[in-house]
Image: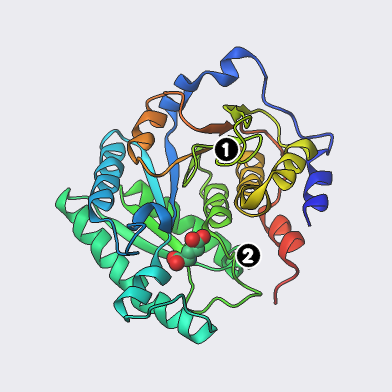
Amino acid sequence: MTDMINKETQAADVQPAAADKAAFDRSALKEKKRIVIKVGSSSLVHEMTGELDLYKLEQLVRLLCDLSNQGKEVILVSSGAIGVGRKALGLGKRPDTLPLKQACASVGQAALMMIYQKLFNEYNQLSSQILMTKHTIVRDVSRRNARNTFNQLLQMGVIPIVNENDTISTDEIEFGDNDTLSAVVASLAKADLLILMSDIDGLYTDDPYCCPDAQFLECIPVIDEHLYDMARGASSDFGTGGMVTKIDAARIATDSGCDMIIANGRDFRNIHRITNGENVGTLFLAHKNKNFNLTQYIEQRHGHLK
Ligand code: GLU
């Protein structure tokens, strides 16, 4: 699967962003106007109990409202539906059947949105919900409608809150992870910055938790085979799961002309630091790949959908 992706990377018409000093100058990030921020479940819940971390949620909402007050257009991609639903339904362990998972998502998504709307309302900030599946992207009418809806909402100063439509998603139509979903949203909405709030500071040459020699990578000008090899070959889960998915997300975002940053979601103030031009997280530089086609990419990667 990744081989196919890597071959695409080598296409002659992919122009690496100028690798000069200016391209690495983080102060350019201050000028970003349309920003997608992805927050994973692990950044939203208490590690010990799995219950929502209300302090962090409030902080996140306040930060996003402030970005909107600065005149930025903000899209939030938030996970948490299944986890919140599971807690609400009093289930001890992760749901192990599809109907149970979807029931959890149904309860949890509504509960999560109620909390988000309550918090956004405190700052007089309108927010809305958009739930997507791969069908949204591969069907021309749905894709156009979704893009128009994002544009309309952002024009009116609303902050859309996006998640996968977990209640109806099955293997064939699900993105499966919100890293991919957020990159798809960034591409669809023609965002100029995507921030993935992760459980790690950014990209390392190896797993920093077990390899003291692991080096932090501040900037990735080009996503190539070498980068995938590094992520795949690194020790522990660091290499086999999360990071490859994040590099895939970076492929979608940067080929669509959107810079992407992976930063640590333990401290949401990193969002403020990034948009203030500070050197936080790993920055993947946008490329101009005029041949990138989101629908084709999704179909190539996930198979043809009816
Ligand atoms: N859509 C899932 C949820 O809201 C999360 C997927 C992910 O965390 O990547 O629970």
Residue 54: give x, y in percent of width and height: 24, 56
Horizontally, residue 119 falls left or right of residue 155, namely left
Out of 82 and 190, give the one closest to the viewer: 82
Which residue is at 65% across, 50% downward?
Answer: 236
Tell me: residue 200, above or below residue 80.
Answer: above
Q: Is residue 301 above or below residue 198?
A: below
Amino acid carrying label 1: it is: Pro
Kind of residue at disc 2: Asp
* Secondary structure state at the residue bearing disc 1: loop
Quadrant of the rendering where the C terminus is positioned: bottom right
Mark 1 neighbour density, 10 Å: few (under 14) some (14–19) many (20 or more):
some
Q: Are marks 1 and 2 in contact (CB under 8 Å)?
A: no
Q: Secondary structure at mark 2?
A: helix
Give coordinates of residue 198: x percent, y percent. 48, 46
| Residue designated by label 1 | 208
Give me the C-alpha separation between circle 1 and circle 2.
Answer: 43 Å
Quick check: 142 left or right of 61? right
Instruction: Name which of mark 1 and mark 2 comes first in the sequence.
Output: 2
Residue appearing at x 35%, y 55% in the figure:
44
Viewer-closest of 50 and 272: 50
